[in-house]
Structure formats: structure tokens, C-alpha cells
Amino acid sequence: MGNANVHERNSGGVVESGCFRRHWRLSPSIESDPKWPGVLFNTTCLIGPKGILTRYRKANPWIPWEVHASPHDVPGYNEGFFPVADTEIGYYHLFDR
């Protein structure tokens, strides 16, 4: 990473980093998933040169302003709560605070 040209910009919730000519993005969105009908998630996707690497569905929505579901509240939810992506520039752990 010594020769990496890394820059970070936060604009409207999107953080971008560039490493050589590869681009990495965190893209927040409201997501619906056919596996969980009637449920909306506040989701952030980690997008790399090969597409979506992982996604994080917010576990702690700010009630009452955020009306999105937490994976903890969805019966039968069987996907990981706090994903880690192993990328060519290191590990990314997605979470909310």
C-alpha cells in the first residue's frame, strides 16, 4: 500500500477510495429482498472492481425516525449480521455505530 494513491471523500453518504486504477465504493440504499417480502433494510454495499463484494444491513435503526427493519427483528433471518470482505487491498468490516 506504500504506493497507493488513496483519497477519501464523503459526499451525500458515499465514501470513495481509489487505489491505483481500481475504485472502491460504499453505497448506502434502502433495499428490499425477495427472500424477505414486505421488509425494507437500510443497506450499505461494498462495491469493488468486480461488483458487489458484500453488503451490510443496518442492525440498529434509529427508532422512530428510521423505519427500516433490523436483521435481528426478521424471523428466520439466516445471513451474517456483520460481514467482512477480504479484498486485494485489505479487509473491510461494515457496521453502524
Image: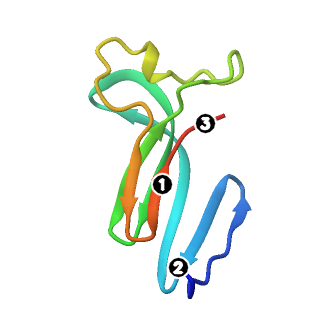
Q: Position of residue 54 (x, y in %)?
A: 38, 50
Q: Residues within 10 Å of mark 1 (few under 14, many from 20)?
A: some
Q: Position of residue 72 (x, y in %)?
A: 44, 17
Residue linked to disc 1: 92
**Numbered label attached to residue 1:** 2
- In the depicted structure, whether residue 23 falls above or below residue 38: below
Residue at 72% x, 60% y: name it.
10
Marks 1/2 in contact by CB < 8 Å: the verdict is: no
- Taking depth in this image into account, of 2 and 83 the one nearest to the observer is 2
Q: Position of residue 30 (x, y in %)?
A: 52, 38
- Residue at the far front in the pictured view: 2
Residue mark closest to the camera, 3 vs 1: 1
Quadrant into which the C terminus falls:
top right
Amino acid type, callout 2 = Met
Q: Residues within 10 Å of mark 3 (few under 14, many from 20)?
A: few
Asked whether, in this view, residue 10 is left or right of residue 45, the answer is: right
Asked whether, in this view, residue 65 is left or right of residue 2, the answer is: right
- Say what secondary structure mark 1 lies in: strand
Amino acid type, callout 1 = Tyr
Residue at 35% x, 64% y: name it.
51
Residue linked to disc 3: 96
- Say what secondary structure mark 2 lies in: loop
Residue mark closest to the camera, 1 vs 2: 2
Residue at 54% x, 56% y: name it.
26
Mark found first going from the N terminus, 2 or 3: 2
Residue mark closest to the camera, 2 vs 3: 2
Q: Quadrant of residue 83?
A: top left
- In the depicted structure, whether residue 26 falls above or below residue 95: below
- In the depicted structure, whether residue 95 falls above or below residue 2: above
Distance (Cα) linking label 3 and label 1? 13 Å
Amino acid type, callout 3 = Asp
Q: Position of residue 36 (x, y in %)?
A: 32, 24
